[in-house]
Image (cartoon, rainbow, N blue to C red):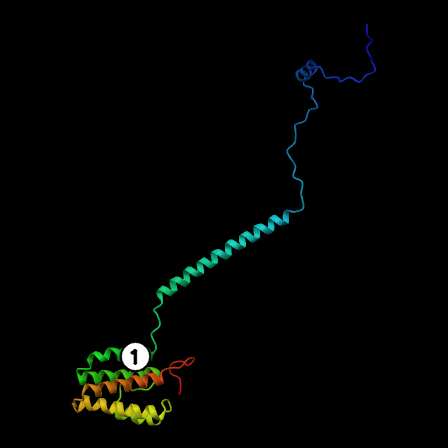
Amino acid sequence: MPTTNTNSTALVLPDPADATNAAATGEVVDIRDIKGAVDIPSGNEWVYWLLGALALLTIIGVTAWLVRRHLAKRAGEQAPPPAPPPHVIAWRRLQDALGLIHDAEQFCTEVSLIVRVYLEGRFNLHAPDRTTEEFLFELQSSNRLVNDHKELLREFLGECDMVKFAKAEPPETELRRLHEAASRLVGETQPRLGEGEGGER
């Protein structure tokens, strides 16, 4: 019969009956609940804070840009477009005036008014509300037009007045020459590149 080694290490389990007896007698058994997981700081939390701050700043920036764009678009829709400069208006009206060339008096009245309004807008010369004599007298002491343009204007207005007030009946070729004189005056006195309206010559 084999002998039993009594010196070997044995695993001794508690008797379940002892635990039941301890619970019945009110004794406290030293069995503790498992505690929750504990976060161990890694030292890289600042990276997450930085990324969060950058994301927040990006959202704020995009929102501000969208708001400004929307407001600028609304302001652009509400603001009326700027008025075209005097020489552009004069060119358009001179083209339209050719439709009146078969009525000499109406044609000369319109072309003369176009030139007068242009000179007022371009050089701040009070031409529309003055007679030809008054206007030409004031123009003599002004340096806003060169002598060649003053002479061209004197002849042009004089011939237009002959048709308007003396009831002259010039041929169409003469009327077209008056139209060319008006176009030349506007073309040679309109602002050059980099020069604003109302500039001195």
Q: Quadrant of residue 87?
A: bottom left
Looking at the rendered image, the quarter that the C terminus falls into is bottom left
Q: Position of residue 113 (x, y in %)?
A: 25, 83
> Along the line of sight, which residue is nearer the eye, 163 or 200?
163
Q: Please, is residue 79 above or below residue 99 in the view?
A: above
Q: Please, is residue 175 above or below residue 35 in the view?
A: below
Residue picked out by circle 1: 91
Going by the numbered disc 1, the residue's amino acid type is Trp
| Dot 1: element | helix
Q: Please, is residue 164 above or below residue 78 in the view?
A: below
Q: Is residue 64 visible?
A: yes
Q: Residue furthest front?
A: 173
Q: Position of residue 137 (x, y in %)?
A: 30, 94
178 horizontally vs 79: left or right: left
191 horizontally vs 49: left or right: left
**Residue at left offset 25%, top offset 87%:** 177
Q: Position of residue 148 (x, y in %)?
A: 34, 92
Q: Badge 1 local density, few (<14 within 10 Å), some, or many (20+)?
A: some
Q: Quadrant of residue 123?
A: bottom left
**Residue at left offset 78%, top offset 17%:** 10
> Along the line of sight, which residue is nearer the eye, 65 or 191?
191
Q: Is residue 112 visible?
A: no
Q: Residue furthest top?
A: 1
**Residue at left offset 35%, top offset 65%:** 78
Looking at the rendered image, the quarter that the N terminus falls into is top right
